[in-house]
Amino acid sequence: MENLQTIREQALAALNAVQDEAALEQWKVAQMGRNAALTQAMKSLGQLSAEERPLAGKQANEVKLALEAAFEEKRAALEGARLRASLSSEKLDVTLPGRPLPLGRLHPITQTLRRINAIFAQMGFQVYRSRDVETDEYNFLLLNFPPNHPAREMQDSFYVEGGDPENPTLLRTHTSAGQIHAMREYAAKDPGNPPPIRIVLPGMCYRFEQVSSRSEVQFTQVEGLAVGENITFGDLKGTLTDFAQRFFNANVRTRFRASHFPFTEPSAEMDVECFVCGGAGCSVCKHSGWLEILGSGMVHPNVLRNGGYDPEKYSGFAFGMGPERLTMLRYRIEDIRYFWRNDMRFLEQF
Amino acid sequence: MKTPLSWLKDFVDLEGINLEELAHTLTVAGLEVEEIHYIGLPMPAGLQQTKVSGLSWDPDKLVVAEIREVGPHPNADRLVLCRLFDGQQEHTVLTGAPNLFEYRGQGELKPPLKVAYAKEGAEIYDGHQEGMHKTVLKRTKIRGVDSYSMVCSEKELGISEEHEGILFLPAETVAGTPLADVLGDAVLTIAITPNIARDANIYGVAREIAALTGRALKPMPTEVQAAGPKIDGAVKLDIKDSELNPRFVLGLIRNVEIKPSPAWVQQRLRLAGMRPINNIVDATNYAMLELGEPLHAFDYDVLVQRAGGKPPTIITRPAKPGETLTTLDDVERKLDDFTVLVCDTAGSLSIGGIMGGLESEVTEATRNVLLEGASWNFINVRKTLVAQRMSSEAAYRFSRGVHPAMAPRGVSRGLELMRQWAGGVVDAGLVDEYPRPAAVVQVHISPADAKRWLGVTLTNEQMTGILASLGFEVTAEGDGLSVTVPDHRLDIETGVVGKADLMEEIARIYGYDNIPATRIGDPLPPQHGNPELELEERVKDALARMGIQEVMTYRLTTPEEEARRLPPGTPPDDKPYVKLANVISQERTVLRKSLLASVLEIAERNARLRQRIALFEIGPVFHASEETLPDELSRLVVVLGGQQQPAGWHAADSAAYDFYAAKGVLAELLAGLGLHDLSYEPGTHPSFHPGKCARVLAGERQLAVFGELHPQVQGQYDLGAHTLQAITLNLEVLGELAPERFDSRPVPQYPPVIEDLALVVDESLPAGQVEAMIAQTGGNLLAGVSLFDVFRGDKIGAGKKSLAYQLTYQHPERTLTDDEVAKLRERIVRRVTQELGAQLRA
């Protein structure tokens, strides 16, 4: 059986010289195929004597298994080398930009409105919307702005042609116009014992003002209204401070200043500590450390009464804020006109 | 309102007060200090809660000095050299101040002139430059003479813009004293909201400061030294309409000498923002600024002359039809029937509470002055101001309300100031008509009110202390207090409103900061949703998920701008515009009728910037209606154009938006909202291409119209290469159709059988019909029909098209047999062949 040893050695030597997968296939045919020396040797086993045959058969089989194992090892080595070669050649420029996807975005004001609504929703305030075009009665009179009252000076209105001269039609100057609608709607449910109210009123408002980087002819506003039998100025401070800490950050401080709105009394402006500089003074807060955020106050007894709520029994607070201003502060936007101009270079940043 | 600190000190002791803290205290209490303007006093460094401006005078570099001699300049006629003592040593100071020329060459001046002296390195305002610019005084040589210091004008010190000559200081000032100790001041600019009109004067602000800081308030200065005869008989009064003119008061001072007011008076007026005129006019303004009661001075002799030498009668009455008056500003004014005039028997003299007339004005020649203080209906004054388009300091105050009790106080103060500054003798007493006395307002409050409104527990004593500090008279009554409103304010009402008014006063003085923040303890109202808003939000989210950008646009536009959304010559629709009665810009004259026009404007704005246009907006359109208020209708518009994918460097994905892409967006949106049984049919809408427009129907109701923009509409916008597709949808209809919920379908557990079916049909046959028939014939076992190819070509012949469908057969409870599928398929083929003339494509 020296022959088998020779076959094995020669085959393994030939395998050693194999460099690629084609040569490996050729080697397999040559060494393990039909005409291979080993195959021939195995065929010739039958010519051996019955005594010699088992040992020779066993040895031939061992050679065959050894060659198969060597083949498999070589094959794996060649495949590994090929994979390594291809991986090293298939190199991408990972700095090329990604293929852009069309990400649809909501307008920044919608995003701000949603945040405001969501924060108040968690405090039990529901969204109540009312119309853009109003009467003087709802926009002013029932909110305790008598005709020719000096407070009207602060809110120049767009009037609509053809209205009733005694009660002109106008574009609402504030979403407070919805307060009376809401109160009357709620009160109508049970006039003797009207239910408590907790609502926010988002919407578009209009003022007769020259457009500039600071003011627009139309702007959104979110009004809030809480009415009940036991609502205090302390509740106003607490609710609005909670809001500010959700909207800006959890530690922001608030400051309430006395102010004047005809439909609230006492009235207050709320400032928050500047979130850009943390109150240390910067250009955003004009070095005061504080940012003016919203107007608020206890609902004026006349307004409660006009809404169908007895001011001797009910009290409430109201507030109003400008989503544009909040958005401008949050993202340090310099020009309010960006919002309705809708340049994609602006909108795509949000 | 400009409030000089020095003037406030006349009425409240401000010793040791920090100005910044004072400004903050006032601001938080509702008197917003918009700015502190420093005139020499030290300005604080670091964080300022209040805006500051002005100049601090270095105590070492800006001092009082005395000019001992004024001599000529050797090389210049228009300059003089001063021998000046600054408290330590003498200097030679050069100046061109014209008010020193008269002292030139007089030798040693006795007494010396006291002036403001700036040493080298002092910061001052540049007197020679237009406007107010700061500069630092440097050593230089002027016409051969060394100059390192100067004597200052008001402008250089920042007191006023006056630069005609240098400022002289009172003789009793001592050379070497820091100037800030003599002249230093600060002016607080306070925003006066309508509810604190009573504080539009120095005394009012002083009262607030006293209440807020616990300091004593000095009494209101209303004393007058009247040494003359009784005024009775010198003038008569006749008020025709006491509602418009509830009170009228006159005083008389004789033998005045008209001349400039004392320097300190002029400076106070300037600091308060008024121009000094002469001692009589200045006294009226000074008294008004101090107490808040506007006054008007008449030349008494002119009135006597107009009355034919007899004592004049002053009459107040509404203007007659067509009546005119030439006011002090030299405007001839046509008066309305509500304009209230102050007249005499010869005619009108002034518009009551607003502005005087030219004829009876005080002049250089005036000797005897009749001084008016009155009370006017503030609403009527406002009405008059708006109608006449005029304003004045007097009108500013009267239009916000001045209590009638202030009239005699103001007149007395004015007379006394005239007496002090112009000499003369004041007639004893006043002529005072008060036909409609103001009601005395009383309000009852108790600690329970403070608890209910403010949420704080206050005792009667605490509330009494606060209210008394503001001048309220407070007495115990039952479990609470009876509060009488002082006669300088009109803003407190009676009853429950009065309680709220007083709660505001208590809260302001108690301090908003001291009221604890609490959470609402009241029960929550019944909760309910807002279905319209929720639907809008779902639509917005769905469209954004499809890569479409939301826009928000102007709701004010013009008919011309909106006309661009229609081809030229489109007949107008029958829906009228909501038009503005007052227009601020020719670009915003009506409320929009078309949301499509709004979004197309934005598409145009972005067309040159982006290769992909995908925009949507949800918002109202407005139609004028028979009712008082117009209809506000909720609409959705989507505009698509250019590439469906954003531009990138990669070659793939550059397909353009077309009709079917728009239809895909709409179909996905509606399917996502649970709307399924909709039909699409050719639509007609002037904005769209007539062959590429469809409408979406739910039964008979039209939900949406979409398609490719009409080429002529396209041509009216600057859109570059983009061809636009648009969708317009009625959100009110959508709200009615969108189901609240739907039943889900189980996921089949058995394998489906999927096969293709290609049919050749006439080109004119709508594909929708074929699909509907397949679906109907397939029945429950046909789980899906989807078109995957449309083919035209020679192989199938002209006028024909091939529609290839993938059919999915599915039984919910078992696997379908080949035989069952074959039968079903045969039934479908037979039906479309027979009824639609389709042929099975090999």
Image (spheres, coloured by chain):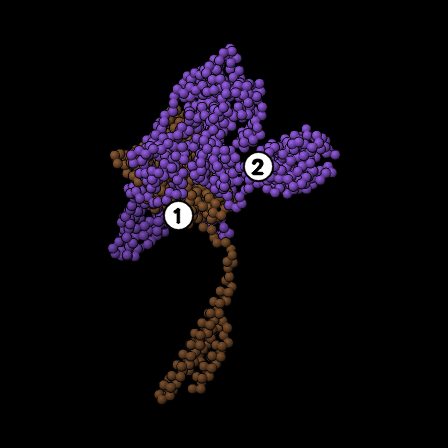
Residues behind callouts 1 and 2 on a single chain: no
Residue type at tag 2? Val
Q: How crowded is the residue under tag 2: few (<14 C-alpha within 10 Å), some, or many (20+)?
A: some
Residue A230 x %, y %: 30, 40
Task: State which chain is coloured brown.
Answer: A
Mark count: 2
Q: Is residue B493 above or below residue B38?
A: above
The image quadrant of residue B481 is top left
Check the residue under mark 1 and report the chain it is in. Answer: A
- Chain letter, disc 2 residue: B
Residue A13 x %, y %: 49, 79
Q: Considering the image in quadrants, where does the N terminus of chain A appear?
A: bottom left
Seen from the viewer's position, the closer of residues B424 and B405 is B424
Give the labeled residue for mark 2. Answer: B182
The answer to whether the residue labelled 1 contacts the one labelled 2, judged by CB atoms less than 8 Å apart, is no
Nearer to us in this view, B191 or A182: B191
Check disc 1 and give the amino acid type: Arg
**Chain depicted in purple:** B
Residue farthest toward the top in the current orientation of the protein: B308
Location of residue B522 (image quadrant)? top left
Q: Position of residue B705 (x, y in %)?
A: 38, 38
Other residues around mark 1 within 10 Å, as few (<14) / some (14–19) / many (≥20): some
Q: Which residue is pictured at 67% across the width and 32% down the height?
A: B109
Q: Secondary structure at mark 1?
A: helix
In the figure, is residue A83 to the left or right of B536?
right
From the viewer's perspective, is A296 left or right of B113?
Answer: left
In the picture of the structure, the residue carrying the numbered disc 1 is A246
**Residue at x 31% of width, y 42% of height:** B529
